[in-house]
Image: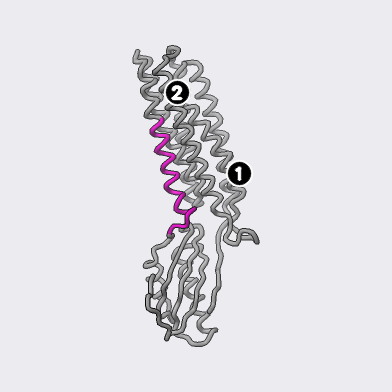
Amino acid sequence: MVDRPRTSSADTRSAVQRVLLITLALNLAVVALKATVGWMTGSLSLLADALHSVTDSANNVLGLATNRLADPQPDRDHPYGHHKFEAVGALGIAAFLGIACFEILKSGVERMVSGGSPVTMSSTALWIMLLVLGINMFVAFYERRVGLELNSKILVADAHHTMSDIWTTIVVIAGLIGVWYGLTWLDVGLAFPVALLVFKSGWTVLRENLPWLVDEMAIAPEAIHTQVMQVPGVVNCHSIASRGLLGRQVFIDMHLVVQPTDIRAAHQVTEAVEDRLEQVYGPTRVTIHIEPREYTEEAITY
């Protein structure tokens, strides 16, 4: 039996931290602008949107903290690396989104039941909100582009959150324009769609990160089997399992039946298998259980 793990992963944490610091500064500016305009106009939907943006800033701080912990290199206490800290950070973002959704709905119901101060509008407030919209669009597309390049779950998740902020800002601007034309009920009415957009964004982040945390299959075993069978010297492979994040770090286990009968030659076949899997799927850590050609088993599975 030859069990040989192989580890390969790029440490992109410094680049991720730089992006998070830039977006944190921009998100803090957005919070200040929205809160100022919300206080000036008395708009519930705008104050709710400012709360949504507060979570953007909190997410950046959370991302900075978890990203420092997400060292791809294994150590004695974490022999499989620290990648999942990023997924934990992404789930924290989903939690913040849930809190924001609840607060928006709560404020909307309270305004409908008890009323509130009238909403006032001005052209200055609208121009400020258009500036806010431009900042949000830059942050979302910048984070998503860099997140995909670095394959960073925390950046992509935060970009999802900021994308929802874009839509909420558009809805709020539409509501403020309606208030300007005398449709005061739009301010409260649009607070509820804002909450739904926030919830949708949180659900998306949750759905994308849970499979990684619960070790869902990373690569279909049939696909791994197809690649391994193309390596010279391989007779068959079975009991294939995989977990991790494709393109970032994948862990693969398998039983391998090889043609060579001596250990050195069999080891060379396993090296070729590992090289092929890493070439096809990116950074992989493969553990192979060698079996002789005459080995048989009642139930051979993928």
In the rendered structure, which amino acid carries the disc numbered 1?
Answer: Ala
Judge whether residue 183 is colored magenta: no
x then y, percent, for residue 54: 53, 31
Nearest to the observer: residue 282 or residue 111: 111
Q: Is residue 111 above or below residue 302?
A: above
In the rendered structure, which amino acid carries the disc numbered 2?
Answer: Ser
Residue at x-position 51% and y-position 70% = 287
Give the alpha-carbon distance from disc 2 to disc 1, as whole Å.
31 Å
Give, as a single range, the part of the protein colored magenta. 195-216
Nearest to the observer: residue 134 or residue 96: 96
Image quadrant of residue 198?
top left
Residue under pointer 2: 107
x then y, percent, for residue 201: 42, 39
Pointer 2 or 1: first along the chain: 1
Q: Is residue 213 above or below residue 28?
A: below
Question: Do the residues under discs 2 and 1 have CB atoms within 8 angstroms?
Answer: no
Q: Quadrant of the C terminus?
A: bottom left
Dot 2: what SS? helix
Coloration mode: one colour
Q: Nearer the viewer, mark 2 or mark 1?
A: 2
Dot 1: what SS? helix
